[in-house]
Image: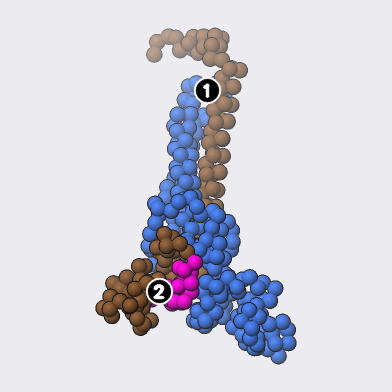
Chain colours: A blue, B brown
Amino acid sequence: MSSSNSSYNSPCAACKFLRRKCMPGCIFAPYFPPEEPQKFVNVHKIFGASNVTKLLNELPPHQREDAVNSLAYEAEARVRDPVYGCVGAISFLQRQVQRLQKELDAANADLIRYAYNGAIPPSALPPGTTSMQPVLPVARRRSSMEFAADPGSISNGGGGFFQPPPYSLPWDNNLSGDINGGGGGGGSMI
Amino acid sequence: MSNPTSSRCAACKYLRRRCPQDCICSPYFPSNDPQRFAYVHKIYGASNVGKLLQQLPERARFEAVESLYYEALCRIQDPVYGCAGIVSWLQQQIHDVESEIAKTRAEITVFLNSNISISELNTQHPQTDDMGMENLSNKHKGPL
């Protein structure tokens, strides 16, 4: 018997929405269960069923679930924020990373300051006390963002660590603060 | 009235249709950048883009098209994760940097505590211990 759902069971959310028979082997059925109707509604609204079909057909089956989930994420972000969509969240997170990086740099500077200025010379130590010369901080902290993935490869296609595209956002300095109310700014939607 | 064939916007050129004067895509898909519409169309489809733009006030449409183009570009580069992959990556970056900050602050605390301990030891065993210092200086008297 075919492992995919359907005509005997409840039709998938896609076929229910599109009011068509959910055939065995329906490409949507594994990823749009009937108990999550909103997921397909959003994806259909933003991308359209035929575009999603084309996208899925271009991918091997083991990657389709991740693809659908990321499409659903972007669609929901776009529904919430029709102007900026997912990009609003990216912009917000980028600013957060920059702010935290500055905080890390300041903390590192403090640490080095303590390491050099806080050293007690051995002559000032009471007899029998071992030297408490502080160890210089290990230079292991990065001062700028690392790109953990292979810089030459953009399309990972297989999960795991992601590489940002080699192009910057077109409005890095222009966006107002109105992103939190939009596309899920910063929240863990994935 | 429609635009002459030579000044059709990229969208109407791509879709091989006449470009009306009030074409909703025309301000955002100039004919000199055909790839922009091609990418957006591939991911979203022309009618979805049109519907989306119609729902927005005119002042917001340029930004909306910019973001759609960016997302389309991301999706074409990474068909599995698209823009969502970047969000995930940034969230991981935030987590990593926060961990580094916590570690650094913990090390600062260690330094602060070690300095306080030494200061306390100094007050318990003050350097003005005359017996110890005199003995030392006595030992070192005499020809060298």
- SS at badge 1: loop
| Label 1 crowd (10 A; few <14 / some 14-19 / many >=20) | some
**In the rendered image, which quarter contains the C terminus of chain A?**
bottom right
Q: Residue at x 28, y 80 (%)?
A: B5
Look at the picture and state if A115 lies above or below B38: above
Q: Is residue A189 magenta?
A: no
What's the amino acid at mark 2? Answer: Tyr
User: From the viewer's perspective, is the residue at label 2 or at label 1 nearer?
Assistant: 2
Disc 1 marks which amino acid?
Answer: Leu
Q: Which numbered circle lies on residue B63?
A: none
Q: Position of residue A140 (x, y in %)?
A: 46, 47
Front-most of B129 and B51?
Answer: B51
Residue bearing the label numbered 2:
B39
Q: Are marks 2 and 1 on the same chain?
A: no
Instruction: Specify few, some or many for label 2: CA neighbours under 10 Å numbering under 14, 14-19, or 20 or more.
Output: many
Label 1 sits on residue: A125
The x and y percentages for residue A109 are 44, 38
Q: Which residues are magenta?
A: B35-55
- Looking at the image, the residue that sits furthest to the right is A8
